[in-house]
Image: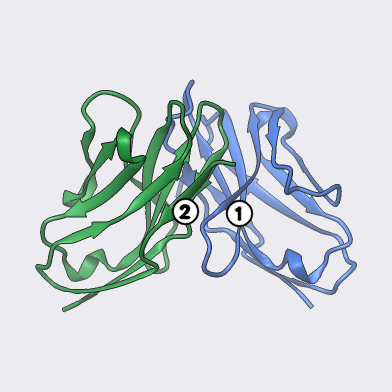
Chain colours: A blue, B green
């Protein structure tokens, strides 16, 4: 399968712990996005990378959240000092193109449960 | 703030019925519009998109959507649904940057 992959698929953690998720985009895609999705809602934009540069970050992303994309390939999303409100599905998507009308290819997501 | 509204959260139809899912956005400038679909157990995938030209766009599996600028709408239609169309449908918009705003989604269930 050459699609977007995410690891782990499920993560259960205790409040206050740090967690890190990984996303491997489609290999030739230069753009990578992170979203959060809670029950009954659509994906909510968190951040966006073009190659290794983080170009846009949602104001919803608190200081506890950080994302990286070293070398413009895979990306990691870290949440420090997790809170119960962080429980959600975290989606990664990638795209190839030069404009804002690119089709985004989504991964299966990482479901985070904070107890 | 920009937003996307999907009018129906749940829709139940019988096979061969016609489908129309409403989507309205709030933004006065140039937009790119998308419909994504998530079939049970699968990833989100693109159904169709509009960025310029003919406001009636056709997508995969017989779906189409019409962009009506004056109404800030981008409704999704299909003349005759099948059981395999059971899925969750998301309308989304980008407004020149790369931030994509999604609606809350509409769950469609098609009875065989």
The residue to which callout 1 is attached is A6
| Residue marked by disc 2 | B103
Please give left or right for residue A90 compared with residue A107 in the image: right
Identity of the residue drawn at 64% across and 47% down: A23
x and y, in percent, of residue A92 in the image: 59, 48
* Rendering coords of residue B35 (x, y %): 36, 47
> How far separated are the C-alphas under marks 2 and 1?
23 Å
Using the rendered view, name the quadrant where residue B90 is placed.
bottom left
Query: Which quarter of the picture shows residue A12?
Result: bottom right
* Residue at 31% in and 55% down: B22
Which residue sits furthest top?
A98
Q: Give the residue at x 88% y 66%.
A: A17
Residue A14 seen in the figure: yes
The x and y percentages for residue B9 are 40, 68
Along the line of sight, which residue is nearer the eye, A115 or B80?
B80
Q: Residue at x 20, y 49 (%)?
A: B63
Q: Residues within 10 Å of mark 1 (few under 14, many from 20)?
A: many
- Observer-side mark, 2 or 1, equals 2
Give the letter of the chain under mark 1. Answer: A
Left or right? Give the position of B108 relative to A68: left
For residue B105, above or below residue A77: below
**Quick check: marks 2 and 1 in contact, CB under 8 Å?**
no
The correct choice, above or below, for A79 with respect to B27 in the image is below
* A14, above or below B78, in the image: below
Whole-percent x and y of residue B8?
Answer: 36, 65
Q: Nearer the viewer, residue B29 or B96?
A: B29
| Subunit under mark 2 | B
Q: Residues within 10 Å of mark 2 (few under 14, many from 20)?
A: many
Q: Nearer the viewer, residue A103 or B26?
A: B26
Residue reaching furthest to the front: B70
Task: Say what secondary structure mark 2 lies in.
Answer: loop
- The local secondary structure at tag 1 comes to strand
């Amino acid at each position: 399968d050459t699609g977007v992959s995410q690891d782990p698929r499920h993560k259960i953690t205790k409040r206050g712990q740090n967690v890190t998720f990984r996303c491997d985009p489609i290999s030739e895609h230069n753009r990578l996005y992170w979203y959060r999705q809670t029950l009954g809602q659509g994906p909510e934009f968190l951040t966006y990378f073009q190659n290794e540069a983080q170009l846009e970050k949602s104001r919803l992303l608190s200081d506890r959240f950080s994302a990286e994309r070293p070398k413009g390939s895979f990306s990691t999303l870290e949440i420090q000092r997790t809170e119960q409100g962080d429980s959600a599905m975290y989606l990664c998507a990638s795209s190839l193109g030069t404009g804002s009308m690119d089709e985004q290819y989504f991964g299966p997501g990482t479901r985070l449960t904070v107890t | 703030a920009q937003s996307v509204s999907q009018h129906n959260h749940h829709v139940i139809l019988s096979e061969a019925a016609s489908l129309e899912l409403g989507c309205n956005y709030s933004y006065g400038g140039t937009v790119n519009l998308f419909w994504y679909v998530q079939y049970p157990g699968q990833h989100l995938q693109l159904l169709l998109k509009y960025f310029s030209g003919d406001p009636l766009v056709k997508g995969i599996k017989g779906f189409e959507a019409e962009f009506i600028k004056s109404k800030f709408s981008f409704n999704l239609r299909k003349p005759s649904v099948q059981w395999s169309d059971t899925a969750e449908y998301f309308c989304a918009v980008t407004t020149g940057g790369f931030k994509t705003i999604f609606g809350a989604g509409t769950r469609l269930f098609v009875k065989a």
